Amino acid sequence: MYSYNHKFERAARARRAKAVFFTILFHILLIAGIAYGTGAELDKYTPEFVKTLLGMESDEATTAKVDVPKP
């Protein structure tokens, strides 16, 4: 009797994905703004896998490098 139009389903899925993306982006910016405003050290609270993803090196990694004499 009634035919279901799939374009409305695709449009709803696109709107939902866009809403999730902007929600995550907003919360990341909000948390970063609060952390920057309070002067908190992000290294202390950031997990190790996030540091490796962002390319942040810990102090132990920079001091653990050994100079090897070159011939």
Image: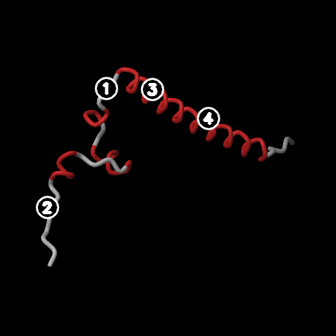
Q: Which residue is mark 1?
A: 40
- Residue 32 sits above or below residue 6 on the image: above
Q: Which coloring applies here?
A: secondary structure
**Numbered disc total:** 4
Q: Residue at x 32, y 47 (%)?
A: 56
Position of 66 compared to 54: left or right? left
Estimate the spatial distance between the alpha carbons at disc 1 and disc 3, rounded to whole Å.
Answer: 11 Å
Residue 17: which numbered mark, if any? none
Q: Quadrant of the N terminus?
A: top right
Q: Amino acid at mark 4?
A: Ala
Element type at mark 1: loop
Location of mark 3 (residue): 33
Q: Amino acid at mark 2?
A: Val
Q: State which quadrant residue 68 falls in.
A: bottom left
**Residue at which label 2 appears:** 66
Q: CA distance from mark 4 to mark 2?
A: 48 Å
Residue at screen point 61% across, 34% down: 19
Q: CA distance from mark 1 to mark 2?
A: 31 Å
Q: In front: mark 1 or mark 4?
A: 1
Residue assigned mark 4: 19
